[in-house]
Amino acid sequence: MSDTLFSKIAAGEIPADILYADAEVVAFRDISPQAPVHFLVIPRQPLPTLNAALPEHAALLGKLLLVAAQVAAQEGIAASGYRTVINCNADAGQTFFHLHLHVLGGRALNWPPG
């Protein structure tokens, strides 16, 4: 596994508030939340950006979204609504180069975000 902060969280080497974990995916609370509920869903397999995903990653990418929906329900934001975001590369705001899905909710979210 690569040596990113997120791969270390996925491996249990760095503590995090884990909301979901299985052999492929980990979800945990963002340490700098931008909404009352803000968590990340990451693949254990290190992919630096969405651009690095290949056709063989299709099931994994789908699982990230399914886990996002499951944890959103668990966190009580599924009925009121939530936003999912994947930032890809620096101009989009990606700061950790391990693919991750942000899930934000718990309040009304404006569009565009800012």
Image: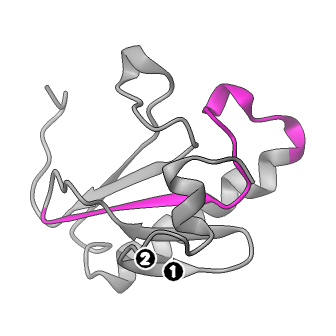
Which of 61/31 is in front?
31
Measured in 3D between alpha carbons, the distance from the residue under mark 1 to the one under mark 2, in whole angstroms, is 7 Å
Q: Residue at x 67, y 25 (%)?
A: 51
Where disc 1 sits, the SS reads strand
Question: From the image, which quarter does the C terminus lie in?
Answer: top left
Relative to 15, residue 45 above or below: above
Quadrant in the picture for residue 67: bottom right
Left or right, residue 55 beside residue 17: right
Q: Which residues are magenta?
A: 36-56
Is disc 1 in contact with disc 2, using a CB cutoff of under 8 Å? yes
Left or right, residue 97 beside residue 40: right
- The 10 Å Cα crowd at callout 2, few under 14, some 14 to 19, many 20 or more, is many
Quadrant in the picture for residue 19: bottom left
The numbered disc on residue 71 is 2
Q: Is residue 65 visible?
A: no
Is residue 50 found inside the magenta-colored segment of the image?
A: yes
Amino acid identity at mark 1: Tyr
Q: Position of residue 68 (x, y in %)?
A: 48, 65
- Say which residue label 1 marks: 20
Is residue 70 found inside the magenta-colored segment of the image?
A: no
